[in-house]
């Protein structure tokens, strides 16, 4: 090679190592650095075959081509005679298939999306087969196999049958047609409506690839605060273009349906769900949508909540509203995901009780193709909430959880908060509805409460930022959501490790610190410096950025902070026992027992359920005030440890991502201190007690923190 070429190649390599913008997510396919692993793979992977023709099989072929070209040091050719390939991707009905009969039987019973990956001896050599009942199953199997390679696991004895525990694994985009994203912190919407349907951005494919790689099989393209315009022909053309891109990846498209659409785009005088004209309008509209998108998934609806129109505008209930849409969708196999996030400031009742009060009496009245979409907790995606009482509360209605991947209340996209522990905390909570062990996960997957269909939703944190999620570690939350939707039994640690291996490196000296000193403790750190011990909803008004425990005197009481913390000279916390709002009564008696007495209630939910004096003795023996302060200070310390851990990894991470994360951790520390100081000083005005000895004093006084204003904080709803 000429000298100049050597220099260019060298520079290219340096550039490659130093500059990594994170666009490739966890599908990096970097060269496997461990020689023994690489050799072991090369000994088996001599060629691959993907017989058959379909757009999904093309996706598999493309993905393998991309992956093998860089993962291994030598090319893995495509076998022109598939039977000769040492890696064969093949439908379970194909006669050329030769796998263990028991495994095959298991696969055949496991449904359309399941797959089997197995290694068999073929003569002197080994052969790997990925088998499934459908092409989409093959795609999931292919991605799982690539994950095995990316995480450097052995491939010489594979015998894996995997099937999703949940039917519909769906991302909810709160994306508007003008490309703003409600509570979006990673740039603009990835859906460029203006240029659709003519311009198909490469990102749409990469978005679909990423989702398919973790088993996500549905997406709601539009905000639940919905715009009826998306249901007009001009926009349905655009929706069709996206659906066409996503289909080979197994992803179905859903839309949000604005309840008043018959008036706004249909010219009717009413949207009353019992009105025949309205019913007809929706029937025709649905038929029209299916003409564009034959496998359209259905509607997601936010009705009679935060100003959105709904059936109650016509004195009809949620079941009447949901069923009307369900009847229109039913002939096409479409679903209605009807949100239970309803509350009204004119109702003189603890906001956390209102969804249950509305929906419990309607249990059993919803059509089989309606699923009630319930936020993980009864308030609103706080850093910590107990599980929503509608899990286990509704037993004759399909129920699905809605998690928030975008970090509206957990520091936006600049705070590292690994959310798998938050998701798991809800999923593993025991509702007791059908005896001990009736966890939320087992309620929603249909094990303990019978359902027609199961689903799992997450509000996406994806945007147009180069690295998709703003924070490089935000990718882990998208990843963890998908993995848990597929298998809620996976542990937070296992998911984190997988993600780190694929996203950064397989080196143990890097995996361990990132997983155990950064990711796993990160969510608890956020709880500590924002809302420890069961505090909730004390953030800045409307933009929800930064601390705002003093927020009071707003048009709606239930959007203030003082409504929730109720601090006064006597104490702090929201009494939800029978002496207070009695929200506790919405849970099973076994659950009530855990929280009813302040002496027994776990610290993490103490002020969620109890209003307690500042000198209340907590389990540690310290006063409530001291314990609260210690939590706030611990939160900041945890961030400092995260920062230090990251800085210790400088040599092991490419410069671009290292610096990006490092900067964000600096912001996180600054904001953690802001939260801590503002909250401690504010609550101190009531407790009148000293910050425990030995802790650093806040640098500024309370007035300073109260005066800070953030009019341009991102993600806010434009009209608020
Ligand atoms: O968390 C709140 C947000 C609103 C959001 C609402 C909801 C889409 O602040 O921006 O609106 O929840 O879930 O409907």
Image (spheres, rainbow, N blue to C red):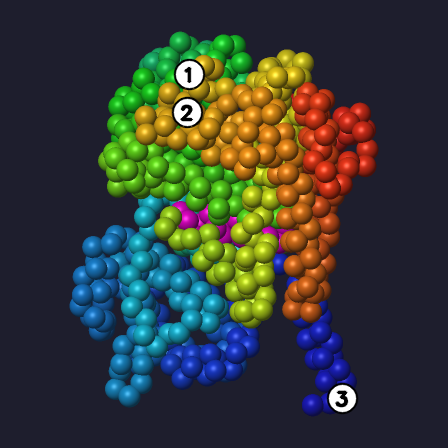
Q: Locate residue 319, reporting x and y percent.
A: 34, 20
Label 2: few (<14), some or many (≥20) within 10 Å? many
Principal secondary structure, stretch drawn in magenta = helix
Label 2 to label 1: alpha-carbon separation: 8 Å
Direction bottom: furthest residue: 1
Residue at coordinates 55% horizontally, 29% vertically from top-left?
617
Q: Please, what secondary structure does the residue beneath circle 1 have?
A: loop
As drawn, the label of residue 596 is 2
The residue that disc 3 covers is: 3
Q: Locate residue 317, reporting x and y percent.
A: 37, 15
Q: Tell me where the magenta segment starts and ends, as one range.
A: 471-485
In the rendered structure, the answer to whether residue 679 lies left or right of residue 443 reads right
Label 1: few (<14), some or many (≥20) within 10 Å? few
Direction front: furthest residue: 621
In the rendered structure, the answer to whether residue 697 lies left or right of residue 189 reads right
Q: Locate residue 268, reporting x and y percent.
A: 45, 14
Which of disc 2 and disc 3 is earlier in sequence?
A: 3
Residue 39 seen in this snapshot? yes
The residue that disc 1 covers is: 578
Instruction: Confirm or deny contact between disc 3 and disc 1 (CB under 8 A).
Output: no
Which of disc 1 and disc 3 is earlier in sequence?
A: 3
Instruction: Confirm or deny contact between disc 2 and disc 1 (CB under 8 A).
Output: yes
């Amino acid at each position: 090679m000429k000298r100049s070429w050597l220099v260019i190649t060298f520079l290219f390599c340096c550039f490659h190592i130093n500059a990594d913008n994170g666009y490739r997510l966890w599908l990096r396919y970097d060269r496997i650095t461990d020689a023994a692993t690489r050799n072991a793979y090369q000994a088996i992977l001599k060629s691959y075959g993907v017989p058959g023709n379909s757009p999904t099989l093309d996706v598999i072929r493309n993905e393998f081509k991309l992956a093998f070209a860089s993962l291994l040091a030598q090319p893995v050719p495509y076998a022109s005679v598939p039977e000769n390939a040492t890696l064969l991707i093949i439908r379970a009905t194909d006669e050329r298939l030769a796998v263990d009969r028991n495994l095959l039987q298991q696969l055949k019973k496991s449904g359309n999306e399941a797959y089997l990956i197995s290694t068999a001896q073929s003569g002197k050599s080994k052969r790997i087969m990925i088998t499934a009942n459908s092409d989409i199953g093959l795609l999931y199997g292919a991605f799982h196999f690539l994950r095995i390679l990316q995480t450097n696991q052995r491939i010489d004895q594979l015998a894996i049958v995997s099937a999703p525990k949940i039917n519909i694994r769906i991302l909810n985009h709160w994306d508007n047609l003008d490309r703003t994203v409600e509570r979006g912190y990673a740039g603009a919407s990835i859906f460029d409506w203006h240029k659709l349907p003519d311009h198909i951005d490469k990102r749409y494919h990469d978005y679909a690839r990423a989702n398919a790689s973790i088993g996500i099989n549905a997406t709601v393209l539009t905000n639940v605060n919905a715009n009826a315009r998306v249901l007009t022909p001009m926009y349905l053309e655009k929706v069709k273009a996206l659906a066409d891109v996503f289909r080979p990846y197994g992803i179905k498209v859903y839309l949000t349906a604005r309840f008043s659409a018959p008036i706004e785009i249909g010219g009717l005088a009413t949207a009353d769900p019992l009105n025949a004209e309205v019913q007809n309008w929706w029937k025709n509209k649905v038929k029209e949508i299916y003409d564009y998108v034959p496998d359209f998934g259905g509607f997601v609806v936010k009705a009679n909540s935060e100003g959105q129109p709904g059936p109650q505008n016509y004195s009809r209930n949620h079941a009447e509203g949901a069923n009307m849409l369900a009847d229109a969708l039913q002939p096409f196999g479409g679903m209605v995901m009807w949100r239970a996030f309803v509350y009204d400031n004119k109702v003189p009742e603890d906001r956390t009780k209102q969804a249950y009060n509305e929906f419990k009496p309607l249990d059993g009245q919803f059509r089989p193709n309606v699923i009630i979409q319930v936020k993980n907790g009864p308030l609103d995606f706080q850093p910590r909430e107990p599980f929503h009482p509608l899990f286990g509360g509704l037993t004759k209605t399909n129920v699905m959880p809605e998690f928030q991947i975008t970090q509206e209340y957990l520091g936006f996209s600049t705070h590292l908060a690994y959310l798998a522990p938050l998701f798991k905390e809800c999923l593993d909570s025991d509702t007791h509805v059908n005896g001990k062990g009736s966890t939320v996960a087992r309620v929603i997957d249909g094990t303990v409460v019978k359902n027609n269909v199961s689903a799992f939703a997450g509000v996406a944190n994806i945007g147009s930022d180069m690295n998709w999620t703003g924070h490089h570690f935000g990718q882990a939350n998208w990843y963890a959501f998908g993995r848990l939707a597929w298998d809620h039994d996976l542990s937070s640690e296992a998911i984190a490790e997988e993600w780190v291996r694929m996203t950064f490196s397989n080196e143990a000296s890097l995996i361990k610190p990132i997983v155990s000193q950064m990711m796993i403790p990160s969510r608890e750190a956020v709880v500590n410096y924002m809302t420890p011990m069961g505090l909730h909803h004390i953030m800045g008004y409307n933009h929800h950025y930064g601390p705002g425990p003093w927020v009071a005197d707003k048009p709606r009481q239930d959007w203030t902070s003082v409504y929730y913390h109720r601090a006064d000279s006597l104490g702090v916390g929201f009494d939800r026992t029978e002496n207070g709002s009695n929200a506790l009564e919405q849970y099973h008696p076994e659950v009530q027992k855990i929280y009813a007495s302040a002496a027994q209630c776990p610290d993490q939910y103490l002020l969620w359920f109890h209003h307690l004096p500042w000198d209340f003795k907590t389990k540690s023996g310290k006063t409530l005030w001291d314990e609260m302060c210690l939590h706030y200070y611990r939160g900041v310390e945890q961030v400092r440890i995260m920062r230090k851990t990251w800085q210790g990894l400088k040599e092991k991470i490419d410069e671009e991502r290292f610096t990006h994360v490092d900067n964000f951790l600096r912001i996180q520390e600054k904001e953690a201190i802001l939260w801590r100081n503002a909250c401690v000083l504010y609550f101190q005005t009531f407790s009148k007690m000293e910050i425990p000895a030995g802790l650093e004093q806040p640098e500024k006084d309370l007035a300073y923190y109260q005066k800070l204003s953030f009019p341009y904080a991102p993600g806010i709803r434009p009209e608020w």
